[in-house]
Image (cartoon, rainbow, N blue to C red):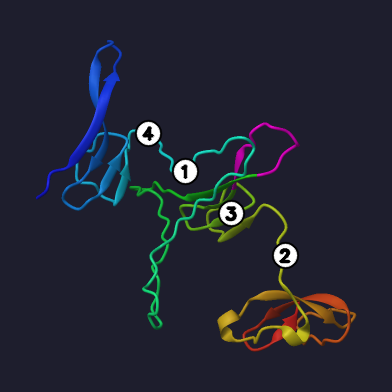
Amino acid sequence: MAPDIIMGTGETISSGAQAYQELFRLQGQNGALGIGGSFNQSLAYGITLSSHETDSIGVDSVCCGLTGQNLTIEAGGTSTGSTNASGGNLILESGFSTGNGGSGINFNVFEPASSGASNNTATTAMLIGSSGGVAIGTSSAVTGISLTMGGLFQLKQYTVSNLPSCTSTIEGSQAIATDTSATCTYNSTPTGGSSTPCKVWCNGTAWVEG
C-alpha cells in the first residue's frame, strides 16, 4: 500500500516551544485529501476537513469594488452522447448525530441594507430542520409542520382553460384562476371568460373553487 504524503509546520504552543502541526495529508491508499489538522484514522471522504474547529469552503473576496465570483458545486454528469443516461444526484448531508440529537441544513444569504460600504450580515433565508421540516423566510422550522413560511406565499396564476390536468397525482394542489365568474362559490366548477381571480384546488378529478 502506498504511504501517505503529509505536510506540516511548526506551531508555537503556550510554553513558547515549537510543536509539529499537521496541515495536509494525501492518503496513499485511495488519494483522499485531508486538510487542516492531524488525522488519526483513515479519511472517510474524498476531501476531509479537520474536526478541530468549524470549517468553511469559499471563494476569496475580490478587491477594488468588483463583483464577487460565483461558486458552483456540480454532481457528475454522464458521458456526452449517451442515450437516456442519468447524471449523478447532488446530495447535501448534515453531520451525523446520536440518540435524540439531530442536525439540519441552513441556506444563508446577504440581504441588501442601506447604501454604503459596510459589509452586510448573513441571514438564514431557508433551512431544513432535523425532523425534515422546511422553513423559508424564518430562522426556525416547526416540528411536525412540513413547511413554515416567514412571509407571503403566492400561488401560481392560470386562466381556467390553462389549468393543468387535475388527476390523483396532483390532488390537493392549489392555484389562482384569474378569469372566473364574479362570485367564488366553494366547491363549484370554475368558469372562465370573466376577470375575477379565485383560488381553486384539485380534488383528484377536477378543479373546484375554494
| Residues tagged 1 and 4 counted as in contact (Cβ below 8 A) | no
Return the residue at label 3: 135
Q: Pick whichever, 64 or 39, lies toward us.
A: 64
Asked whether residue 40 appears in the rendered view, the answer is no
Asked if residue 137 is positioned above or below residue 118 in the image, the reply reads below
Return the residue at label 2: 154
Q: Residue furthest front?
A: 64
- Disc 3 from disc 1: Cα separation: 24 Å
- SS category of the residue bearing label 3: strand
Instruction: Give the mark nearest the N terminus, 2 or 3.
Output: 3
- SS category of the residue bearing label 2: loop
Image quarter of the C terminus:
bottom right
- SS category of the residue bearing label 4: loop
Report whether 164 appears left or right of 92.
Answer: right
Nearer to us of marks 4 and 2 is: 4
- Disc 4 from disc 2: Cα separation: 41 Å
Q: Which amino acid does label 3 sit on?
A: Ala
Return the residue at label 1: 58
Instruction: Specify start and end residues of the magenta stretch as a single range.
Output: 111-124
Categorize mark 2 by other alpha carbons within 10 Å: few (<14), some (14-19), many (20+).
few
Q: What residue type is labelled 2?
A: Gln
**Is residue 196 within the magenta segment?**
no
